Amino acid sequence: MKRTAVSIAATALLLPLAACGTGARADAGSTVTVTVGYQSKTINTVTAGTLLRSLGYFEQKLNALHDGHTYNVVWQDYATGAPITAQMTAGKIDIGSMGDFPLLINAARGKQLNRPTHLVSVTGYNLRGGLNTVVTAPDAKLSSLRDLKGRKVSTSVGSAADGTLVRALQRAGMDPDKDIEKLNQQPAVGASSLAAGSADALSQFVAWPGLLAYQGKAKALYDGAQLNLPTFHGVTAREDFAEQRPAVLEAFLKAQTEATGYLGTHPVAAAEKVAKATGLPPEVVYLYNGAHGISTFDPAIRPELVSALKQDVSVLKSAKLTGDIAVDSFVDDRYVRKALGAAYAKRLAAAPAPAASEVWPKGATKTQTFTSAAGLLKYVARHRTGIRAAYVPDATTGTLWFADRAVWVADGGRLLPFVAPETARTYVAGHPAARTLSYADALGRAS
């Protein structure tokens, strides 16, 4: 028998009723259907979703199993993690990817409905929390979180972005339940609300803050990395599927690892692929997923991320979204350890690459890296019409941002970029010779 794996684009509404059975569905003629839920525009999941799908690595791994089955891979695209969890607990999705807070809700719902799930790998992470950002309208007078008191803030309740908002407000001495009016909205709806003026700020996860900033529709108000708490996205699998089809799950994790390798060695090409599949600008995809992007990709389940999950439980409990969650029972790295073999321990020991300034020249298939933001500015000043995008890391948090959207500070001979105005003010307050200046002035000084 010729064994092939077929990628099928489908929506939940088109799923056959047979998909409600436990484990991957086995049809007549030894055909096994594996259903993968992903979020194409949540681009820190691309190595388990958009990019992986475009590369075809999972199907290739399934072809190589030679176990007497033909495999159909059904890819289902969603805007958030909540519907993926709903489909998983209904037995209709085998493998899904989502952010850390949705992962915890996934764990809670799975246990509650006797459809246990497990975190089996990580996609993208940021050890400081830079994946989430609070933005406001570009012409807004707001300059700190405290300015949000009494105002409307859009977020997706139960998401990592909501968790960032809650924690950030608490650190600012505010009550998230009383001092703001929270609008529970999908990211696209929240973006529209911000544009229409019906929301004063938007707290969201990738790629929405970067997209709106790039389009000139928003400016950063708060950099999630100021919390210095890890945020990440990961892969969850139904327990019954993992037990019944361990070779299939291992094939997925090996394919994810290969997609991660492709992202690392071909960051520009990967950004172009994801952009083509999602409709996002490649420049925005690269901000998060590039060589020095906000996100680091690695399937290994780092201890720091597990610790962060445990800290996240209290936020969800206070919002009455979950009760206690046994995080250690939810995390299951057996499959990814087997998939990665001896490389697993090395990955856990490796530190994320340090942030760096990058320029993406027009027409180039590679970016140029600079040792300082000033060096980047000098290059941009000399090639103003030849720049596709320029990226600089925040001087204090390391979060990458668009150079022309950053808040710039001159301190003696140094030119320092910041994502948000508050971090820039904090720096200036501690450095008597420092002062803020416009991007145009920063370019002038660098040239």
Image (cartoon, rainbow, N blue to C red):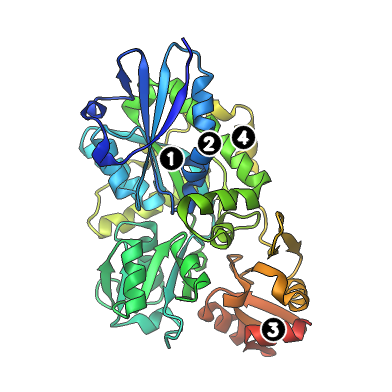
How many C-alpha atoms fall within 10 Å of the one at disc 4: few (<14), some, or many (≥20)? few
> Which one is in front in this view, the residue at disc 4 or the one at disc 2?
2
Task: Judge left or right: residue 279 versus residue 187.
Answer: right
Q: Type of residue at label 1?
A: Val
> Which one is in front in this view, the residue at disc 1 or the one at disc 3?
3
Task: Judge left or right: residue 21 versus residue 163.
Answer: left
**Which quarter of the image is occupied by the C terminus?**
bottom right
Determine the secondary structure under disc 1.
strand
Marks 1 & 2, CB-CB < 8 Å contact: yes
| Disc 2: which residue | 256
Q: Nearer the viewer, residue 339 or 259?
A: 259
What residue is at 41 percent from the left and 78 percent from the top?
145
Residue 176: quarter of image: bottom left
> Which one is in front in this view, the residue at disc 4 or the one at disc 3?
3
| Disc 4: which residue | 345
Q: CA distance from mark 4 to mark 2?
A: 17 Å
In the rendered view, tell whether residue 94 sits above or below residue 301: above
| Disc 1: which residue | 235
Determine the secondary structure under disc 3.
helix
What residue is at 30 percent from the left and 81 percent from the top?
151
Where in the figure is residue 38, as x and y percent of width and height?
Answer: 40, 44
> Which one is in front in this view, the residue at disc 1 or the one at disc 2?
2
Q: Type of residue at label 2?
A: Gln
In the rendered view, tell whether residue 28 sits above or below residue 122: above
